[in-house]
Amino acid sequence: MRTKTIAGNWKMNKDSDESVQLIIALKAKSPGFSKDVRVIVCPPFTSLALAKQLFEGTDVAVGAQNMHHEDEGAFTGEISAKMLTSVGCRYVILGHSERRQFFGETNESVNRKAKKALQSGLIPIICVGETLEEREKGITEQVISAQVKGVLNGLAAAEVEKSIVAYEPVWAIGTGKNATPQQAEDVHRFIRKLIGQMYSWPVAEKVVIQYGGSVKPENAAALLRQPDIDGALVGGACLKSEAFNQIIQAANPA
Ligand code: PEP
């Protein structure tokens, strides 16, 4: 059975003091969080070490929002997988649509990063998703298929099993307009079947597929009730402790 997984992507928000305040508020509202839900918090690089420290003793894991595929070298401004693991990171978001849109990331570059992340002991949260134009043209499945095949290219079954795929329709990110539970479920099912064809059905059944795009307390439960929606990657709503905790509660099967 797949564990419901809720990840918060803080994006470029919260300096050190603000990060401490948000984490303290999150901990205060979530007594012990839930062992049945995997919770991952992804602050900016500058707050990773303090997040790791402040979440010590809870089940909350810390993730980064990006990394470079090389181990070290002359890559000004970049961060390696080893640097992330050295501050206690266990997860890394890769190929977010904002990275694809503003920083030129492609399926190939995301694939290189995913390989390095897995080799380094990080679990990648690999993002895919179609634009509004692509959805309106009726080519969502074609786009998603090319993305999934591209980002997973060359990964072993054992690596894919432990990876997380985040389906984030670009038109739903930060817009307040979420995919309906059925729209999201259809694409999640499509991704799972595709992974089944690329690897095997037992592998596909193990892969956690999160939905992302304007997830809020009001729509989380309906989305998370879908059979192939195994969690949420949350942007805006994760910056408010109350809202993020309500989403975590919505994922709690108990
Ligand atoms: C995201 O950035 O991954 C995201 C889903 O953002 P939001 O929840 O704000 O739409």
Image (cartoon, grey):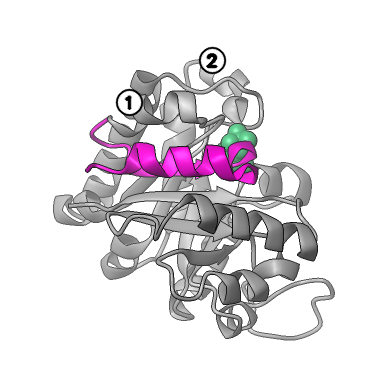
x then y, percent, for residue 61: 47, 66
Q: Secondary structure at mark 1?
A: helix
x then y, percent, for residue 221: 36, 29
User: Foreground residue, 11 or 194?
Assistant: 11
Q: Is residue 248 magenta?
A: yes
- Identify the residue position indicated by label 2 in the image: 137
Give the vertical position of 116 relative to 110 (above or below).
below
User: Foreground residue, 227 or 155?
Assistant: 227
Real-space CA distance between mark 1 and mark 2, rounded to the nearest whole angstrom: 17 Å
Give the vertical position of 39 relative to 87 (above or below).
above
- Identify the residue position indicated by label 1 in the image: 186
Instruction: Estimate how packed mark 1 is, as few (under 14), some (14 to 19) or many (20 or more) residues with alpha carbons within 10 Å.
Output: some
Ligand 1 lies in quarter: top right
Q: Are marks 1 and 2 in contact (CB under 8 Å)?
A: no
| Residue 68 visible in the current orientation | no
- Which amino acid is tagged 2? Lys
Q: Residue at x 61, y 19 (%)?
A: 133
Q: Quadrant of residue 36?
A: bottom left
Q: Secondary structure at mark 2?
A: loop
**Magenta segment range?**
226-254
| Residue 181 visible in the current orientation | yes
Instruction: Return the disc, 1 or 2, that comes first in the chain's sequence.
Output: 2
**Left or right side of 213 for 59:** left
x then y, percent, for residue 5: 38, 51
Checking the image for residue 251, the label placed there is none
Q: Quadrant of residue 155?
A: bottom left
x then y, percent, for residue 110: 57, 58
- Which amino acid is tagged 1? Asp
